[in-house]
Image (spheres, rainbow, N blue to C red):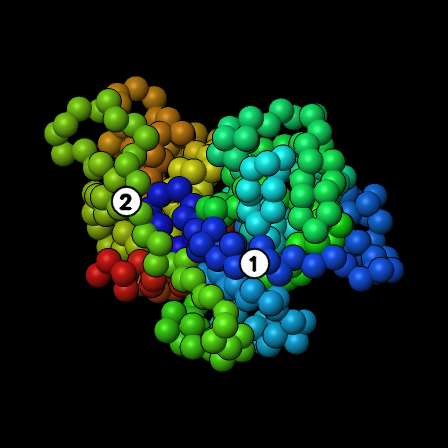
Amino acid sequence: MTPAFGVVAGCSAFLLIAAGVQARIVMPPPGVPAGPPGMSAAEMARDAGTFQQIILPDLLVVAPAGITGRQLTRLSRITGVRHVIGFDGARIKAGDRPVNVIGVNPATFRSWVPLRTAANQEFWAALASGQFAASDSARRSLGLVIGDSYELTGSTSRALTFGAAASFGITGVDLLVNTQTSRALGLVHRVAALISAPADRLSTLLARVSRVLGRSSKIVSLRQQQQQQQLPVSDLGSGQQPTTYLQLFQESAARYCPTLSWTVLAAIGQIESADGANVGPSPAGALGPMQFLPSTWAVWGIDGFGQTGPPDIMNPYDAVPSAARYLCAAGASQGSSGLASAIFAYNHADWYVTEVLALAREYAASYG
């Protein structure tokens, strides 16, 4: 979530409004298929097997009566919006415990979660097969055991197998089910949506979304959920060591590439790992808070602010300065065109360059 110097900030507002959704749970009409038209469970499992990229949401929108197909289309056509995804949801019960659950198409929702979860094939296979998943915190609080069966009660009760646990990147959401199970439980159809529009001004985006959904909707900016996460390495001595990712990005740029704005490092750190929350390995084998390939790290990894010894790809005190050094060598200090080329060298995708530069502008606006 952007911008956030910490674990992926989530959709905490979902928890606040879930009680209002609870009374509106309805049964699907007789004869309505449980999943997407013409899609069998086997096809859902097949389609859940891959994902193209990680998408960072900028807004969470919730409409207690549901978001219509026409509204979803209008949201997707707003200038600056790159991605929109709608999903079901409600507050139901797991046994006798109230829980917040959302229903998603695994094949499309997979790109919206933290990288480590998106890369977990067993997680998505379990979800596509009709099992339910839990957030790590819900698994602990509910005492769930993988392979055991639990009763979930919405409009009706269903005994479902618990298949997997992982971080959803959405605070306040306890359980995840697929679209078929969502219909069977009677969750509110398309009660919420996530919107990614990294290049648009927040005030403009909020106004446009509000015009589409009306006053009854709840819109939460995920860009404003800023956190100063303490760095995970705490035994480096007092001295002048950075103590937060924000400080580490600033100090690394100043020391290893003085003409590079620290906001670019911050954007890359957030997009690659949510500032150390998802350290891989990625599907391509990249590791650490800045997601270096081991072959690239062997050339560019340095012992920056870290402990003495070989550079550690997993240590942010080494990884962030190494990223600054790599970007500088790739041309980041040579004007706007050089910066774009350096970011492209870091990850060979035009969308990635656009995303990094847009997020860097958000950091500059937020932190001056």
Position of 78 compared to 147: left or right?
A: left
Position of 339 compared to 244: left or right?
A: right
Choose between 186 and 127: the one closer to the eye.
186
Residue type highlighted by circle 1: Val
Q: State the residue at coordinates (67%, 61%).
A: 189
Instruction: Report how many numbered discs are placed on residues in the image.
Output: 2
If you read the primary sequence from the N terminus, does the residue marked by circle 2 or circle 1 appear first?
Answer: 1
Crowd rating for badge 2 (residues with CA inside 10 Å; few <14, some 14–19, many 20+): some
Mark 2 or 1, closer to the camera: 1
Badge 1 element: helix
Q: Position of residue 194 (x, y in %)?
A: 53, 60
Residue 4 visible? The answer is: yes
Q: Position of residue 362 (x, y in %)?
A: 34, 62
Real-space Cα distance between discs 2 and 1?
A: 32 Å
Q: Quadrant of the C terminus?
A: bottom left
Q: State the residue at coordinates (52%, 59%).
A: 20
Q: Position of residue 217 (x, y in %)?
A: 50, 69
Q: State the residue at coordinates (48%, 57%).
A: 17
Residue type highlighted by circle 2: Gln
Residue 87 visible? The answer is: no
Choose between 319 and 233: the one closer to the eye.
233
The quadrant where residue 249 appears: top left
Q: Which residue is mark 2?
A: 228
Q: State the residue at coordinates (69%, 36%).
A: 151
Q: Which mark is residue 21?
A: 1
Position of 346 compared to 160: left or right?
A: left
Choose between 160 and 204: the one closer to the eye.
160
Q: Is residue 347 above or below residue 122?
A: below
Q: Is residue 144 above or below residue 193?
A: above
